[in-house]
């Protein structure tokens, strides 16, 4: 049993890069604050922590182990592999989808965590061809049998790829992007029909759905990946929030904020209502954000009437 909402740790991993592309959330970061944020989330009831060796090029895993090592048996650790990292220089240098690399990456992550197992281990290469992904199954199943991992899964936004691992022994979950302005119907249907836990990545739209970046605003910090937007980022373009998505958000903001919810809490509560199999994993950079996100656990899912009103409002705003 785990909390209905988890915490993503990309932001707490601090700055990193891939070539000229920054991958951090800005220059204003400290490991001490990151540890405080992780602990605040746990103290507020969060027991699922989603990370990856790529986050901060190993730093997020190390900090998670430092912050919560004393409560290791009370939390579920989710990590990912597939990117090759240079920890000393805090950068990603490529990818590796070979079976041998699974074991090597896992052992490195276990060392950084200071633990003997990872509860859920996810393939971090969203578009890896199915035939290449199939070659990983024997190794992953051996790791489950040996107790190194509790289960394995795939972080992918392609429902056809995710479906190729259905029914495999030890396949335990999927992870994909999902939020109130980006509803991946096929992936959620896949999780629902197979009673498969699904981690909802980007539940707050990399900050867009919190209301912190209104129309006309711009992120200026060159160390923030949203300032120099990678091609896969849907919510910001060159530091500016996507105008079409802001329009959609504005059309439903009053519903999300009903009953005293913040925008972020409303967005998380929408996911809780969208499917019983979804586990939103919002990130946080401050202890206040971590506690506010966790409060959605108390607020609970949106009502049927609220979900219907949002669906109708978004249908009008769909291009």
Image (cartoon, helix red, strand yellow):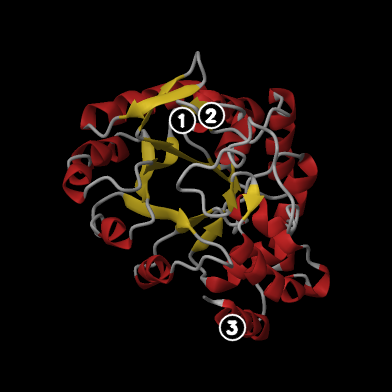
- Which residue, as the protein is rendered here, is positioned at the far top? 88
Q: How many marks?
A: 3
- The circle on residue 108 is none
Residue 41 percent location from the top left of the image:
70, 44
Label 1–label 3 contact, CB within 8 A:
no
Q: Please tell me which of labels 3 and 2 falls first in the chain.
A: 2
Q: In the structure shown, which secondary structural element does the residue marked by tag 1 occupy?
A: loop
Within-10-Å neighbours for mark 3: few <14, some 14–19, many 20+: few
For the residues labelled 3 and 2, the Cα–Cα distance comes to: 42 Å
Give the mark toward the camera: 3 or 2.
Answer: 3
Classify residue 117 by image quadrant.
top left
For the residues labelled 2 and 1, the Cα–Cα distance comes to: 6 Å
Q: Please tell me which of labels 1 and 3 falls first in the chain.
A: 1
- Which residue, as the protein is rendered here, is positioned at the far right? 260
Left or right: residue 113 versus residue 226 is: left
| Residue drawn where x is 57% and y is 49% of the image | 237
State the residue position of label 3: 316
Label 2–label 1 contact, CB within 8 A:
yes
Residue 225 percent location from the top left of the image:
58, 37
Q: With respect to residue 38, does 318 lie above or below?
A: below
For the residues labelled 1 and 3, the Cα–Cα distance comes to: 41 Å
State the residue position of label 2: 61
Residue 245 percent location from the top left of the image:
60, 64
Q: In the structure shown, which secondary structural element does the residue marked by tag 2 occupy?
A: helix
* Residue 63 is at least partly visible in this image: yes
Q: With respect to residue 166, does 233 lie above or below?
A: above
| Residue drawn where x is 30% and y is 34% of the image | 146
Q: Nearer the viewer, residue 298 or 10?
A: 10
| Residue drawn where x is 25% and y is 51% of the image | 169
Residue 193 percent location from the top left of the image:
36, 72
State the residue position of label 1: 53
Left or right: residue 235 versus residue 163 is: right
């Amino acid at each position: 049993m785990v909390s209905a909402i988890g915490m993503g740790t990309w932001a707490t991993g601090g700055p990193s890069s891939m070539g000229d592309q920054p991958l951090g959330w800005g220059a204003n970061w400290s490991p001490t604050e990151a540890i405080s944020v992780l602990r605040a989330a746990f103290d507020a009831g969060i027991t699922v922590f989603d990370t990856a060796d790529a986050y901060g090029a190993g730093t997020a895993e190390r900090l998670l182990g430092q912050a919560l090592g004393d409560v290791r048996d009370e939390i579920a650790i989710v990590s990912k592999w597939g990117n090759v990292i240079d920890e000393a220089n805090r950068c990603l240098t490529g990818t590796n989808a070979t079976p041998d690399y699974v074991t090597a990456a896992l052992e490195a992550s276990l060392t950084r965590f200071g633990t003997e197992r990872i509860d859920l281990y996810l393939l971090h290469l969203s578009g890896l061809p199915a035939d290449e992904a199939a070659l990983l199954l024997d190794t992953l199943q051996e790791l489950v049998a040996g107790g190194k991992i509790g289960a394995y899964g795939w972080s992918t936004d392609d429902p056809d790829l995710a479906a190729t691992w259905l029914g495999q022994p030890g396949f335990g979950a999927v992870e994909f992007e999902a939020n109130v302005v980006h509803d991946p119907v096929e992936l959620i249907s896949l999780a629902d029909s197979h009673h498969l836990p699904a981690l909802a990545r980007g539940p707050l739209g990399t900050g867009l759905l919190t209301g912190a970046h209104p129309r006309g605003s711009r992120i200026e910090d060159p160390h923030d990946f949203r300032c120099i937007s990678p091609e896969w980022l849907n919510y910001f373009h060159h530091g500016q929030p996507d105008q079409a998505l802001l329009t959609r958000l504005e059309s439903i903001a009053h519903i999300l904020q009903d009953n005293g919810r913040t925008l972020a809490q409303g967005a998380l509560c929408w996911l809780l209502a969208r499917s019983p199999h979804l586990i939103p994993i919002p990130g946080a950079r401050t202890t206040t954000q971590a506690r506010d996100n966790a409060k959605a656990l108390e607020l609970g899912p949106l009502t049927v009437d609220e979900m219907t009103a949002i669906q109708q409002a978004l249908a009008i705003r769909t291009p």
